[in-house]
Amino acid sequence: MTKDLVLEKVSKKFGDSYAVRGVDLVIKDGEFVTLLGPSGCGKTTTLRMIAGFETITEGTITYNGKVINGLTPQQRKFGIVFQSYALFPHMRVDENVAFGLKMQKYPKNKMDSRVNELLDIVGLRQHKKKYPAELSGGMQQRVALARALAPNPDVILLDEPLSALDAKIRVKLRAEIKQLQAKLGVTMIYVTHDQEEALSISDRVVVMNQGVVEQVDIPVEIYKKPTSEYVADFVGSNNFCNGVLKNGTLDIIDKTFVFKVDYDSSLESQTITAAIRPERIEVMNNRDSSKLEPGNLLTGELIVFTFLGLIVRLVVKVGDKEINVDMLEKNFTKLKLSRGDQVTLYLPPDGFLIFTNK
């Protein structure tokens, strides 16, 4: 039997309100799963129920075939890494890492080698005699990770572990965490509100909203095929509009736009919300438009552009609607665009995401 972690109809109430409602989730042994969502969506509460820090109001959590609802955090033996590091300031690095081993009465004659092994893994052996205050934030978080790994847990829980760090350090450390997880084969459950972080490191992403799970899938599917308007809006950027689907077109409500759109025939005549990501919109540049859908060509005024490194984000005003468009910086530079320029955009029929209004 694999050591899967299974949540069945898991809910948590505080007073009369549900913080988490009816979560069903299977996390496979050795999988890296991220709980993603904004503050207050229930992701940290879900993690705390898995850890045993919060009691479950309804449902069951099963690990390795056994229900663990009633077990204390110590009995569950999961490794935990907190946002605040939670290192003991009066203990050196090696003493912090050894703390959990001592609590488990790890053999003294093997403890030093185990601590050194872990510090080698996180690249901090040369700092083993330092105190936490002598380390950078990123180094402290590595110590916290080494301490969580020390007792050889089958599951590591990480609660927004990188949110207090600088952006460049976050990117470096999240890559190291993913590499470490893959090397050790340990199950990791990671909580974050950072969509880029979730998409870059996860085997699967669990998108949460107001205490419920909106979508569970691999990162590329979460981004390319969001199953709800909420997921499409939260993960990445989109341009939204409301309209009616008929005869292969999207008739925008209260607008003069009628776009050619690819959609399932079962949605014919329905009022829907459509979205198209900024990078799917093309800025026309002497391209032959004779083979393009004429209704999907729009001309507007470039009112602002923002340099974002690899890409430049344009805001183009078409009528009274502002459309976000992303293009490669090198292509933007070639076009020599300026504020106030007239820009022609093409919205390809297969670039639209369709969401039924429930």
Image: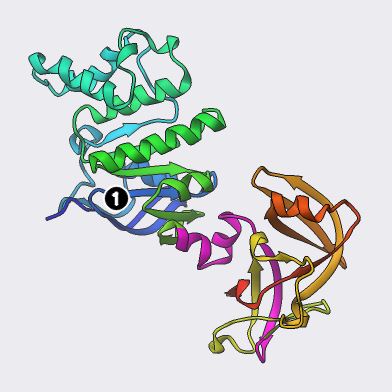
Vertical order, 275 against 106 (above or below): below
- Is 261 situated left or right of 196 in this image? right
Q: Quadrant of the C terminus?
A: bottom right
Judge whether residue 233 is colored magenta. yes
Residue behind mark 1: 31
Residue 1: x and y, percent?
11, 55
Vertical order, 1 against 228 (above or below): above
Towards the viewer: 357 or 296: 296
Residue 185: x and y, percent?
23, 43
Colouring method of the image = rainbow
Location of residue 135 (image quadrant): top left
Mark 1: few/some/many CA within 10 Å (<14, 14-19, 20+):
some
* Whether residue 158 is visible: yes
Location of residue 167 (image quadrant): top right
Q: Residue placed farthest to the right in the image?
A: 340
Q: Residue at x 27, y 14 (%)?
A: 94
Give the secondary structure at mark 1.
Answer: loop
Judge whether residue 142 is colored magenta. no
- Is 295 situated left or right of 202 in this image? right
Residue 235: x and y, percent?
56, 55
Q: Residue at x 38, y 22 (%)?
A: 86
Residue 329: x and y, percent?
70, 49
**Three-letter amino acid code at the position of disc 1:** Glu
Q: How many marks?
A: 1
Towards the viewer: 46 or 340: 340
* Whether residue 53 is visible: no
Q: Residue placed farthest to the bottom in the image?
A: 247
Q: Residue at x 55, y 28 (%)?
A: 166
What range of the chain is rendered magenta? 220-248
Towards the viewer: 281 or 224: 281
